Amino acid sequence: MNHDVSGLTQLGRPVRAPQTPEEAVLERVPNPHPGTAYLVRFAAPEFTSLCPLTAQPDFAHLVIDYVPGDWLVESKSLKLYLSSFRNHGAFHEACTLDIAKRLVAELSPQWLRIGGYWYPRGGMPIDVFWQTGAPPQGVWIPDQGVPPYRGRG
């Protein structure tokens, strides 16, 4: 089993938060079970970015599910990458798909899906969903567990 983490630059040491998604470094580690189809889930219930027109903050609950290939994303680097959107102006759709496509480019997973459950802007929540294709057979993929937005009533 390959546990080589010698190439990691962020894990186990203080790291300055990246100021932009482009500046953020996503790191990966070898999958300890290559050839086994299993699901990895990351939930980011307090994701923030900025509206590109008003610069007001936008908030989302992101759920990222993927079936690894040869690589896993290193979680600290993912947290730092997601935090780099705090000062980034982009529409909900752009943020959600940019995150998913960057993960696909870095990891080459067997399958990936993202659910971006955005809190209301102008009184209307916007949910954004994307996946790379059909999930592999035999993998248990639970519901993302984020209830539909409900107002005060």
Image (tube, helix red, strand yellow):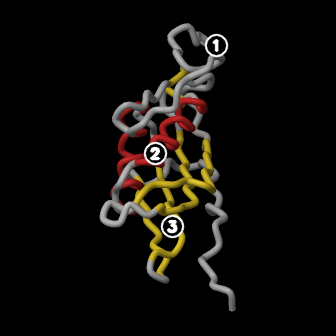
State yes or no: discs 3 and 2 in contact (Cβ < 8 Å). no
For numbered disc 1, what is the local secondary structure?
loop
Quickly name the residue at label 2: 111
How many numbered markers are drawn? 3
Left or right of 48, for residue 102: left
Q: Nearer the viewer, residue 67 or 26?
A: 26
Residue 32 x/y as whole percent: 62, 22
Q: Nearer the viewer, residue 139 or 127?
A: 127
Left or right of 117, for residue 145: right
Q: Nearer the viewer, residue 65 or 33?
A: 65
At 56% from the left and 23% from the top, the residue drawn is 15
Q: Earlier in the sequence, mark 1 or mark 3?
A: 1
Q: Quadrant of the C terminus?
A: bottom right
* Separation (CA) of disc 1 from disc 3: 39 Å
State yes or no: discs 2 and 1 in contact (Cβ < 8 Å). no
Q: Looking at the rendered structure, which numbered label has been put on residue 118?
A: 3
Q: Looking at the rendered structure, which numbered label has been put on residue 1?
A: 1
For numbered disc 2, what is the local secondary structure?
strand
How many residues crowd around disc 3 within 10 Å: few (fewer than 14), some, or many (20 or more)? many
Q: Earlier in the sequence, mark 2 or mark 1?
A: 1
Left or right of 119, for residue 26: left
Q: Earlier in the sequence, mark 3 or mark 2?
A: 2
How many residues crowd around disc 1 within 10 Å: few (fewer than 14), some, or many (20 or more)? few
How many residues crowd around disc 2 within 10 Å: few (fewer than 14), some, or many (20 or more)? some
Indicate the amino acid at tag 3: Trp
* Separation (CA) of disc 2 from disc 1: 22 Å
Indicate the amino acid at tag 2: Trp
* Separation (CA) of disc 3 from disc 2: 23 Å
